[in-house]
Amino acid sequence: MPHVKSALGRPFGRLCQTGIQVALRRRATATCVTFAALACSLICRAGELTISVVDRDGHAVADVVATVTPSAGAPPAAAAAADPKSSVMDQRDLAFLPRVLVIGVGTRVDFPNNDTVSHQVYSFSPAKRFQLPLYKGEFHPPVTFDQPGLVVLGCNIHDSMVGYIYVTPAPYFGTTTAAGRLTLPRVPKGDYQVTIWSPFIADAPGSLSRTVHVEGDETTSFALAAALRTRPEPRPRRRDWEY
């Protein structure tokens, strides 16, 4: 059937098709502009949060866990880039490496033994109770930590070995560097609860948490009042196992 022509001599079918294509292109362009504006808004509203920890003599404290959780009414946070959902707790020179590991809930942790002797890793902690029979190398599959809480690690062969895995649901977390600082980029504007923890910190828990407001680049500092412990606590105790 021949096309019906318009007054301009163009077929109506072809004219309508061209109009639809133009409308779709305009809609696609508008959508891209909307997404670009939204992305710019989120980036512009994000800031950088730096957490600093010093002891009572003003010296930097390294390997301190810091978690940052949105307060009530704050915008929902995206999944933390610091949480890769897989991590490693190594064993070298009769020690866990790192001594303190902070991870998100649901993270899988590998426990390779790169030491010159065999180890038998275990945890009595309610957040994750497990035992890896005596081994060297990378014999065991990763362990999934699906509950928040502190997991204390020990070795059934070497009582001096102690390690910690801090499992958190917080969207932002990490540990302080040798300079006693942790910097978290791209934290959206809002109020957050910042909490720190270390097996060597003896200050009361109530003094280790505070609310901070992120507007741009913010820094919050914790000055400890009590002397650091010379020996980490808590420690693994095999008697807590229920055989």
Image (cartoon, rainbow, N blue to C red):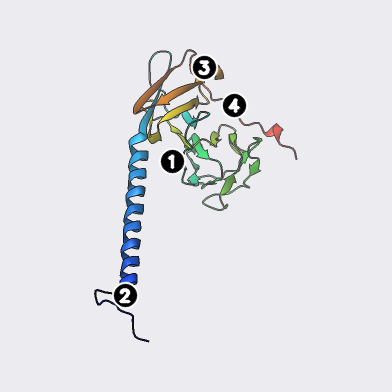
Residue 177 at x, y = what percent? 38, 30
Q: From the image, which quarter does the C terminus lie in?
A: top right
Dot 2 or dot 3, earlier in sequence:
2
Question: Is residue 204 positioned above or below 148 on the image?
Answer: above
Q: Which residue is mark 4?
A: 234
Circles 1, 3 touching at the beta carbon (< 8 Å): no
Give the residue displayed 38% in from the left and 18% down from the top. Answer: 59
Q: CA distance from mark 2 to mark 3?
A: 73 Å
Q: Which residue is mark 3?
A: 207
Mark 2 or 4, closer to the camera: 2
Give the residue displayed 55% in from the left and 18% down from the top. Answer: 206
Give the residue displayed 65% in from the left and 31% down from the top. Answer: 237
Mark 1 or 4, closer to the camera: 1
Circles 2, 3 touching at the beta carbon (< 8 Å): no
Quadrant of the image occupied by residue 54 = top left
Q: CA distance from mark 1 to mark 4?
A: 26 Å
Residue 122 at x, y = what percent? 62, 40
Give the residue displayed 32% in from the left and 42% down from the top. Answer: 40
Q: Which residue is mark 1?
A: 82
Quadrant of the image occupied by residue 188 = top left
Q: Nearer the viewer, residue 61 or 13?
A: 13
